């Protein structure tokens, strides 16, 4: 893997921060290669960063049809503000993508939905929606919708590059929807690299739920009114099959011998039931959070003050100027919402009481 234009991007970072106090102006793009493919990611250095002491790294993965900048700007409502508040470097990889006619298709390969015709088990019903197949896949089965490339290795290499340049203390990964599935898969594959995992609205495919061979802090979040990937039902409306959230959480609890459990009910604009498991190996904490009113979104992202109800909003299917070469809609400038919901999950990811 080879890095391009890193120092030019870094110069632009320094130059832009001298002109503006907007946190987004301090994020820059790193172009690179993996498996002879052009790849890139976005990197944000928090306000006041000097690289004189160790700092945490938080990596966020976008969902199906999303982008790295769309995750930061719209899905999470300006995630970088929490990199400033809690002093960590934020990194947003861009998945592989292609256009199926005029439709932009993107997602990471968590290895469950990039299988060949012969692969078992299948993760969808016979009547399931037929998603476009990535050109990198040869003889994909009818349930395949992910690229057939080594995304796990891509992220591992990115981590090695960032650690070579910055003094990294702890690494946390999170993801939205299919990005949440990938975050969990990456943590299961490379637990020695990771301090904490958060899977947001991304129940893993039925038969493909994973636990790591070493203890890692883990949080999974789902929304009861989610009409895309339910945390309680195995079959989604599109005919794809998923592990229920409780099944996933219970496997982690059993694997790491957690001996204490408590349930906390929390109310802001929406209601959350937190199941917190402690007394686990290596003192890790395993949590599942069920949003009673929320949809396939981050907490309270779809809450309407005028109606007092939550509904789905199309966040994140866009790009900022840093990814203008994707040739899709630009993200909304006014996407910054009440930050409570995103901060709520950030604090769970970092295990801040």
Image: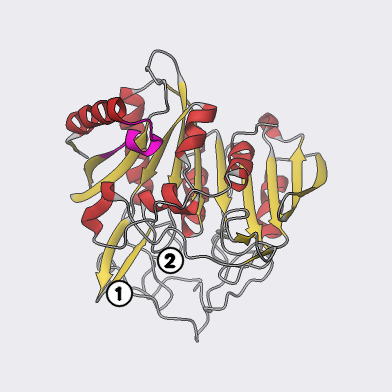
Q: Quadrant of the N terminus?
A: top left
CA–CA distance in space, label 2 to label 1: 13 Å
Identify the element where label 1 is drawn: loop
Q: Which residues are magenta?
A: 20-29
Identify the element where label 2 is drawn: loop
- Does the segment drawn in magenta span residue 26? yes
Task: Give x and y (percent) for residue 305.
Answer: 65, 59
Residue at the spot of label 2: 113
Task: Give x and y (percent) for residue 174.
Answer: 51, 45
Q: Residue at x 33, y 31 (%)?
A: 20
Q: Residue at x 52, y 65 (%)?
A: 313
In depth, the one of 264 and 161 nearer the eye is 264
Residue at the spot of label 1: 139
Residue 57's place in the image compared with 345, above or below, is above
Task: Give x and y (percent) for residue 203.
Answer: 58, 60
Q: Residue at x 45, y 81 (%)?
A: 129
User: What crowding class fits label 1: few (fewer than 14 Cα within 10 Å), some (14-19), or many (20 or more)?
Assistant: few
Q: Residue furthest bottom?
A: 127
Marked residue nearer the N-terminal end (2 or 1): 2
- Does the segment drawn in magenta span residue 55? no
């Amino acid at each position: 893997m080879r890095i391009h234009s890193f120092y030019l991007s870094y110069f632009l970072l320094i130059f832009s921060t001298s002109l503006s106090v907007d946190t987004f102006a301090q994020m820059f793009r790193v172009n690179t290669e993996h498996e002879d493919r052009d790849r890139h990611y976005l990197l944000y250095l928090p306000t006041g960063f000097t690289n004189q002491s160790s700092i945490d790294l938080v990596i966020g993965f976008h969902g199906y049809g999303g982008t790295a900048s769309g995750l930061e700007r719209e899905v999470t409502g300006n995630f970088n503000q929490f990199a400033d508040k809690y002093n960590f470097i934020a990194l947003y990889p861009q998945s592989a993508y292609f256009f199926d006619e005029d439709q932009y298709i993107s997602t990471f390969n968590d290895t469950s939905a990039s299988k060949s015709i012969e692969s078992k088990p299948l993760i969808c019903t016979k009547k399931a929606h037929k998603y476009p197949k990535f050109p990198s896949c040869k003889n994909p089965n009818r349930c395949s919708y992910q690229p057939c490339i080594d995304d796990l290795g891509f992220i591992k290499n990115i981590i090695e590059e960032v650690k070579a340049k910055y003094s990294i203390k702890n690494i946390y990964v999170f993801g939205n929807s299919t990005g949440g599935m990938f975050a969990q898969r990456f943590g299961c594959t490379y637990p020695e690299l990771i301090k904490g995992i958060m899977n947001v609205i991304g129940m893993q495919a039925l038969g493909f739920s994973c636990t790591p061979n070493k203890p890692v802090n883990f949080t999974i979040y789902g929304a009861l009114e989610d009409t895309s990937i339910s945390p309680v039902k195995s079959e989604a409306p599109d005919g794809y099959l998923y592990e229920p959230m409780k099944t996933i959480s219970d496997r982690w609890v059993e694997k790491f011998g957690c001996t204490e459990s408590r349930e906390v009910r929390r109310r802001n604009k929406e209601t959350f039931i937190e199941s917190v498991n402690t007394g686990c190996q290596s003192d890790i904490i395993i949590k599942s959070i069920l949003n009673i009113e929320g949809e396939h979104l981050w907490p309270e992202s779809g809450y309407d003050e005028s109606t007092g109800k939550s509904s789905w909003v199309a966040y994140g299917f866009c790009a900022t100027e840093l990814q203008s070469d994707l040739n899709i809609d630009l993200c909304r400038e006014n996407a910054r919402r009440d930050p409570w919901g995103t901060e709520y999950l950030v604090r769970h990811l970092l295990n801040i009481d």
